[in-house]
Amino acid sequence: MSSHAHDPNCIFCKIVAGQIPSKKVYEDDELFAFHDIHPWAPVHFLIVPKAHIVSMAHVGPEHEALLGRLMALAPRLALEQGCSPYPDGGYRIVVNTGAEGGQEVHHLHVHVMGGPRPWVKG
Ligand code: AMP
Ligand code: ZN
């Protein structure tokens, strides 16, 4: 199987379960969003599926609706978190995948970064 409901060793599963504290941005039955602990930008939060999907490389047709909801949520939360509107404002949406893609946490997550330049990184 490419995904499981929860992985007891996964830091983001623990955040979703409330076993590790986080600064929550949003939660529904399938998705959870929280501030990145080492922000690259004035606004930097992560959106994760509650289910333990390892990476984009593990996504199949059964995840299409979930990822559609996740991506559609990102612009709304970006504005709520203080990003300025398109086109002068905006934000960056990033999904690191695998070692060469720079993925460090192996629970699928979407970075949403924005706010006034310059940023710390990126
Ligand atoms: P990635 O390189 O795409 O796997 O990014 C993982 C991100 O998770 C990094 O930006 C980390 O700063 C962030 N991160 C790691 N641990 C935590 C945590 N406990 N709470 C919030 N963000 C975290
Ligand atoms: Zn997980």
Image (cartoon, rainbow, N blue to C red):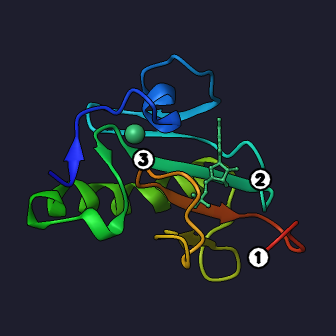
Q: In the rendered view of the protein, which quadrant contains the C terminus?
A: bottom right
Q: Nearer the viewer, residue 7 or 116?
A: 7
Q: Is mark 2 within 8 Å of ligand 1?
A: yes
Provide the residue designation for mark 1.
122
- Mark 3–mark 1 Cα distance, whole angstroms, equals 21 Å
Q: Closer to the N terminus: mark 3 or mark 1? A: 3
- Mark 2–mark 3 Cα distance, whole angstroms, equals 16 Å
- Badge 1 marks a residue whose secondary structure is loop
- Mark 1–mark 2 Cα distance, whole angstroms, equals 11 Å
Q: Amino acid at mark 2?
A: Pro
Q: Closer to the N terminus: mark 1 or mark 2? A: 2
Image x and y of residue 32, in percent:
42, 38
Provide the residue designation for mark 2.
39
Image x and y of residue 94, in percent:
54, 71
Residue 115 occupies which quadrant of the picture? Answer: bottom right
Q: Amino acid at mark 1?
A: Gly
Apparent side of residue 86 relative to residue 60 in the rendered image (left or right): right
Image x and y of residue 61, in percent:
10, 66
* Position above or below: 50 against 46: above
Badge 1: residue crowd in 10 Å (few <14, some 14–19, many ≥20): few
Q: Is mark 3 within 8 Å of ligand 2?
A: yes
Q: Residue at position x 68%, y 54% from top?
A: 44
Q: Nearer the viewer, residue 90 or 29?
A: 29
